Each structure stands twice: as C-alpha cells, then as structure tokens.
Amino acid sequence: MTFFRSRWVDRPAHVTELDPALLPRGFRSAGVAAGIKPNGLDVAVLASDEPATVSAARFTTNARVGAPVMVSREASLDRLRAAVANSGCSNVGDGRRGYETALATQSRAAELLGLDPPSVGLASTGAIGHELPRGPVLAGVESACAQLGADADAFSRAILTSDHAPKRCALEVDLTAGIVRLAAQAKGAGMISPRFATMFCFVETDALLTAETLDLLVGVCVKRSFDRISVDGQLSTSDTVFAFANGASGTPVEPESEDELRLGEALDALLRQLALEIVSDGEGAERVGRIVVRGAAETVEPVARAVADSPLVKAALHGADPNFGRVLQAAGQALPSDEPFLVDLAIEGRQVVCAGDVVGLDDARLRELEDAVRGEEIDFELTIPGEGGETEVFFSDLSEAYAAFNSQYVKGQG
C-alpha cells in the first residue's frame, strides 16, 4: 500500500517512497517494553549521531500541560539531539513528583547518549492523572539506548496508545544539490482538535540546513496538517512535534532557495498524510470529512470548526447520510445572527444549497448524492458572506465504537 493514498494529498514529483521504517542517515532509534502498559512496547528513544544536528518543536496550546511538555519547553529546542517518548501514561497532573520524573528521564537519557540534558526532548502519552513509574521508565530508557538501530520500527510502535497501527513514512527527496532522506513517525487517534491531537510526530532528515530554516518549514507545514484535524474537538495536554536535521547527507538546503521549496513540499505532503492517518484512525472512525469554508477572513475558521466538531454532522457522516441541514445548522452557530444567512453548500461537488436555500433535488440526483457520501473521504464546500478568507478542517465521523471505547477508558490507552 502506498503512503500517499488520500485524494487530498499530492505526492510531489521529486519524492520517492522508501521502506516506511527507514531512518535517514545518522539517526538511530529503539522501542522497548518497560511495563508501563500491560502489554507491548512503551518506551522509545530517537537519537542523532551528528553533533551539528539542529531541531524545531511545537507543543500543545492547552493551559493544562504535562511535565514532559514543561521540561521540553525549557530544553535547547533548536539544538536537540535526541527524544525520549513513552506511552501508557501521559505524566499529567502528578505535581512535583511527575516533574522530577521527567527531569530524571531527560538526565538519564543524556548520560547514556553522551549529551547535555537540554539536548533531549520528552514526550508522554496515555491516561491523565496517574503516576508515571520512575523506575520502569528509567530502566526502559537504559534498555532502549542499548538497542539503538538504523530503523524506526520498534520506535514507531512504542509510542502508540489506541492507534490501530504505526503511522510512519520514509522518503527520498531529489533536490538540485543532491538526494536527501526525510522520515516521520506519528501517533494519535483520539482527543484531537484543533491544534495537534493526543499526538506525537517525530521528523528526521539528513539534509543540511539551519535551525531557522527548519523551524520555518515545520511551522508552515504543521499549520497545514496537524493544525487542520479534529476527531472529537478535544485539545490534548501532551501534543508534541519534534523535527531534527543532522546534515549527514552533506546536501545543503540554502534559505529561500529552490531546494528549500522542494524540501518544504515534501515535508508538507508527509505531514498532511500523517495528519489524515490520525483522523482516519479516530477511535471507531470509518469515514473522513473535509470542510472547506470560503468567505470573510475572520469568520471562516470558527465556521469550519463548528461544522467539523458538530456531533450531528459527524453522526450523519458515519451513517453516510447527506443531511446538509446539519451542516447549515452548525455553520449558523458561528455566523452573526443579525445578518442574512446567505451561504452556498456543495457536497462531493454537488451543490445542495444556494444563498441559504435548498436546491431542488429530484429522486435521481438525491440517490446520486447518497451514493457519493458512502466513500471513505467526503468533501464539503461552504461559501459564506465576505471575502478574503479560506480554510479547511479534516474530521472523522462519530460512531458507536467511539462512545463505547471512551466510556470504558482505562489506564494505558490515552
């Protein structure tokens, strides 16, 4: 199966897919079972062997964050050499004890890798309000550091919680200056919106570029990917994106160059597809919708979020029901109530509403629309009053399985 399989993501012509677990040159990783989860791998370490490695990071904007986010925010975010992640416990809400566990994890990894503690970033995912057992975590770090290898298979599996499978990809990117590799590993399936998710993403490239260039590319691409997804409208406490560039290929990417554009296009496609993997893996999800809103710049975002996070819209999506009245109702919540409701709506390219009024659909056209919304990806296009704005949000459906899973939430599955 090819990685770029969504119709909403185009694979750049200068990009070739590699073994999805491959790491770029100069990177090593490992994942081990430390007993934090009842079963499976749960501690992961990623490291760059190159001293000149540069990095960039993005975190949740929730006011309530976990100790790993707190510690990572104080790290050398433009000069990280490694990251330690665990699944099974988010280390959120455990007070001073949790914070000291995060510091101890950072220090132990740094010692084993021959680095300064601020060169190590942290990420934890799982249930909130539980103690992250310090002994097993530190033992897991020691075991992982002893098993570091040139692929990301175990690493990408050790960060999972309610995910069905690893989310990962490795690419070869053809630049004018030479060939580089670009790879990423992500996790996430629930508590997703609107900025990131209960998600991690680790990005690695062996291209040679400055920290400022990497930060610029990551910022732009994250806004077009992980910032555009919603499963349940809930903003996580632990969202983390780390990106590393170690220059091991010797291929330079100069600022404001053709190669910066080419690398940026590859990163953009990579992160957008990973973001869609997260949405499509939403707990119990069967379909993914995309709402595109055009109109007044200050209004398009709240309207898109209102539609994407509407339980009624999401339930209709799950049932393959082209109930456009629910889309209009959700959009109306975010529009000024003292202005005419002059909106146009198309579903799968078929206009169903014009200037706020339903377009007459005969039986044949209605059956055609019903058939169109039975696919795995459904497009909604909404035009609202005003000009200058356009946005999109990808969202999952809402199923019985989602309610069942989250009504029986247990430690280790966050």
Image: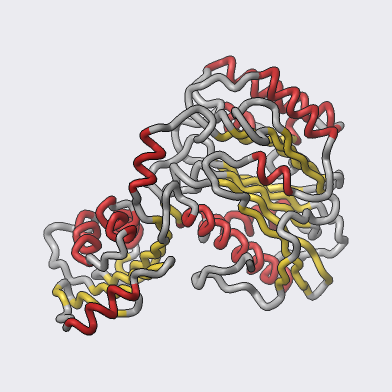
User: Residue 151 in the image: x percent, y percent?
Assistant: 79, 50
| Residue 104, above or below 292 | above
106 and 389: which is toward the camera:
106
| Residue 331, above or below 98 | below
User: Residue 53 in the image: x percent, y percent?
Assistant: 80, 48
Is 244 on the left or on the right of 196, as rendered?
Answer: right
378 and 124: which is toward the camera:
378
What colouring style does the render use?
Answer: secondary structure
User: Residue 407 in the image: x percent, y percent?
Assistant: 36, 34
Is 112 on the left or on the right of 224, as rendered?
Answer: right
Check the picture and name the quadrant holding the N terminus.
bottom right
| Residue 8, above or below 279 | below
The residue located at (45%, 50%) in the rendering is 282
The residue located at (62%, 55%) in the rendering is 218
Is 49 on the left or on the right of 302, as rendered?
Answer: right
Is 341 on the left or on the right of 55, as rendered?
Answer: left
Work out whether residue 297 can be spotted: yes
Name the quadrant containing residue 295.
bottom left
The residue located at (24%, 70%) in the rendering is 385
Work out whether residue 298 can be spotted: no
Q: How many marks?
A: 0
The residue located at (61%, 53%) in the rendering is 167
User: Residue 265 in the image: x percent, y percent?
Assistant: 63, 69
| Residue 351, above or below 83 | below
